[in-house]
Image (cartoon, grey):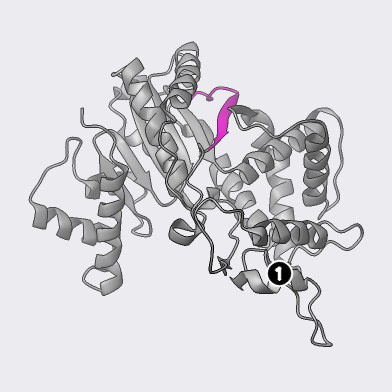
């Protein structure tokens, strides 16, 4: 089978987007058909157009298919039941295992000038991929599964991490069915556009990020005065013309996300998938690859969910972000953050009581002014 090719998938995704943006095609389906006709080729598992129709058929997202690999801008687990090469009589609706492995991407090249915050992976991390692939494979076999779906941040470093692990899984067991799904809402907090110093070199420490992280924590989680609307990197122009955080002025051309906008997309992702997680084929193991910040967020939300379900925790509307921040702050006091595979219990995070809490939090956040 052809080796996983991130470049090929990304190139084809770009071609499809260009067709739609230019007006040559009105939908991604139509764009894919144009490209297919132009190339006059047949995919091993059918055309991307057909795969896309079977996934959700709404024309609003982008699906790229290469052999057993899928990339999609948007997350819909129902596809795994509709397209896997598993006999229909064996496709159950049983509950999946009680957890989903969540991990951070591998180390990426630190080159803000050329890549911004989306660098390629540092070469030579195959040994790390081999160890993680073996852990994932052990879970797959223990749960009697025959496929794995890697749900990744849409950033290069996350997708490339999945690619390395998939290559190793292929070495372990060539019969495994493996897919990659790119999910935009799994990207790290947007940090804006940097103003790099003239003498910046790849690998240099960019102090603007450290200063912005400190200001963000002070603004967003200030005792009794949390400002969830504060945007990452904003020096905050005051009425008298001065800046509240003047140290940030030289380092940012555009500001990043606020904590409100960041949490809205994370909460939305959990709610969107809550009704679909049990529809994931009983033979498919889901693996999430994201960024350090989201890794911690999912850990905190899982802990809070357990406290609500099993320890009687009662949160008022608007208290969830502060509670998660408190858990994270206490955790990093006692341990250096690590980013191996963390198993997030599904039954807690996707519990109906937790989903209703997240819906109320979304309404609270949307109404902030």
Determine the image quadrant of residue 38.
bottom left
Describe residue 125's horizontal placement relative to residue 14 as left or right: right
**Residue 348, x across and y down, in percent:** 69, 32
Q: Secondary structure at mark 1?
A: helix
Q: Nearer the viewer, residue 299 or 104?
A: 104
Range covered by the magenta-colored residues: 93-104
User: Of all residues shown, which one is farthest toward the right?
Assistant: 224
User: Of all residues shown, which one is farthest toward the front?
Assistant: 199
Dot 1 surroundings within 10 Å: few (below 14), some, or many (20 or more)?
many
Q: Nearer the viewer, residue 172 or 67?
A: 172
Residue underneath mark 1:
248
209 above or below 243?
above
Describe residue 318's horizontal placement relative to residue 255 as left or right: right
**Residue 146, x across and y down, in percent:** 38, 19
The reply to whether residue 363 is visible in this rendering is no
99 is within the stretch colored magenta: yes
Look at 41% across and 22% down and name the residue there.
Answer: 283
The reply to whether residue 291 is visible in this rendering is yes
**Residue 135, x across and y down, in percent:** 50, 18
């Amino acid at each position: 089978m052809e080796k996983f090719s991130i470049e090929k998938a990304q190139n084809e995704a770009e071609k499809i987007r260009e067709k739609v943006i230019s007006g040559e095609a009105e939908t991604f389906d139509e764009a894919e058909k144009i490209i297919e006709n132009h190339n006059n080729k047949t995919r091993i598992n059918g055309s991307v157009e057909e795969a896309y129709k079977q996934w959700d058929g709404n024309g609003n997202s982008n699906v790229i298919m290469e052999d057993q690999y899928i990339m999609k801008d948007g997350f819909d687990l129902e596809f795994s039941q509709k397209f896997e090469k598993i006999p229909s009589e064996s496709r159950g609706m049983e509950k999946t295992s009680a957890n989903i492995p969540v991990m951070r991407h591998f180390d990426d090249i630190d080159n803000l000038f050329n890549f911004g915050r989306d660098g390629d992976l540092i070469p030579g991390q195959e040994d790390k991929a081999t160890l993680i692939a073996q852990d994932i494979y052990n879970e797959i076999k223990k749960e009697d599964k025959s496929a794995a779906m890697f749900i990744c941040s849409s950033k290069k470093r996350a997708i490339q991490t999945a690619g390395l692990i998939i290559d190793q899984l292929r070495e372990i067991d060539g019969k495994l069915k493996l897919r990659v799904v790119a999910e935009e809402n799994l990207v790290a907090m947007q940090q804006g556009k940097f103003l790099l110093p003239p003498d910046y070199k790849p690998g240099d420490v960019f102090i603007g990020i450290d200063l912005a992280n400190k200001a963000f924590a002070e603004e967003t989680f200030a005792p009794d005065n949390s400002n969830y609307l504060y945007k990452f990197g904003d020096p905050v122009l005051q009425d008298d013309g001065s800046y509240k955080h003047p140290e940030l002025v030289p380092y940012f051309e555009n500001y990043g996300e606020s904590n409100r906008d960041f949490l809205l997309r994370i909460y939305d992702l959990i709610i969107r998938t809550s009704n679909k997680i049990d529809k994931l084929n009983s033979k498919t193991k889901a693996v999430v690859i994201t960024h350090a910040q989201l890794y911690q967020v999912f850990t905190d939300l899982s802990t809070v969910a357990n406290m609500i379900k099993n320890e009687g925790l009662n949160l008022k509307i608007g208290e969830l972000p502060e509670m998660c921040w408190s858990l994270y702050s206490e955790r990093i006091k006692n341990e250096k953050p690590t980013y191996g595979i963390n198993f997030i219990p599904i039954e807690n995070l996707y519990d109906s009581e937790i989903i209703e809490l997240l819906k109320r939090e979304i309404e609270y956040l949307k109404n902030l002014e």
